Image: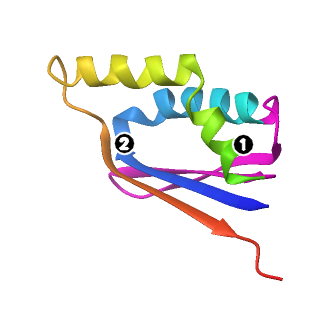
Amino acid sequence: MIVQTVTFIIKEEGKEIFETKTSKDVTSMLGFSGCLSSECWFSEDKNTCEFMLVSKWESKKDFQNWLKRPEHLQEHRDAHKNKEAKPSMVLEKIRKSYEVFS
């Protein structure tokens, strides 16, 4: 089993957009083969918000398959195209993978 985390530190004005995005991601993960659990943690400071997606997977390959699903890849393509039109609300993105220590 592995635990995946991805943390998005975003500008305060992106809070509602990320609430929708992370809710959709949690639902998608929970319905995906190999996902054991998924949830989103949230904290807020004066000018930023932090969303941390935490998920448990049977294997790293299962998580990679979730990342490679067509709709996820398209979201990234669209976001990359829109970078030139408007600045990103994401200040920092941190992704980590952990193996369960027995």
Q: Earlier in the sequence, mark 2 or mark 1?
A: 2
Q: Nearer the viewer, residue 47 or 25?
A: 25
How far across and down, in percent of the image, does residue 13 sit? 35, 34
Stretch in magenta: 30-58
Relative height, residue 48 to residue 2 (above, below): above
Residue sitting at x 39%, y 33%: 14
Does 37 appear in magenta? yes
Residue 31 badge? none
Q: Which quadrant is home to the N terminus?
A: bottom right
Residue sitting at x 73%, y 47%: 39
How far across and down, in percent of the image, does residue 67 sit? 57, 35
Residue 12 badge? 2
Q: Name the amino acid type tagged 1.
A: Asp
Looking at this view, name the residue that lies furthest to the left: 84
Does 40 appear in magenta? yes
Q: Which residue is mark 1?
A: 62
Answer left or right for 40 relative to 87. Answer: right
Q: How is the image coloured?
A: rainbow
Q: Viewer-nearest of labels 2 and 1?
A: 1
Residue sitting at x 77%, y 51%: 57
Looking at this view, name the residue that lies furthest to the front: 61
How far across and down, in percent of the image, does residue 42 sit? 58, 52
Answer left or right for 59 relative to 66. Answer: right
Q: Are marks 2 and 1 in contact (CB under 8 Å)?
A: no
Q: Which quadrant is home to the C terminus?
A: bottom right
Relative height, residue 13 to residue 96 (above, below): above
Q: Secondary structure at mark 2?
A: helix
How far across and down, in percent of the image, does residue 81 sit? 25, 17
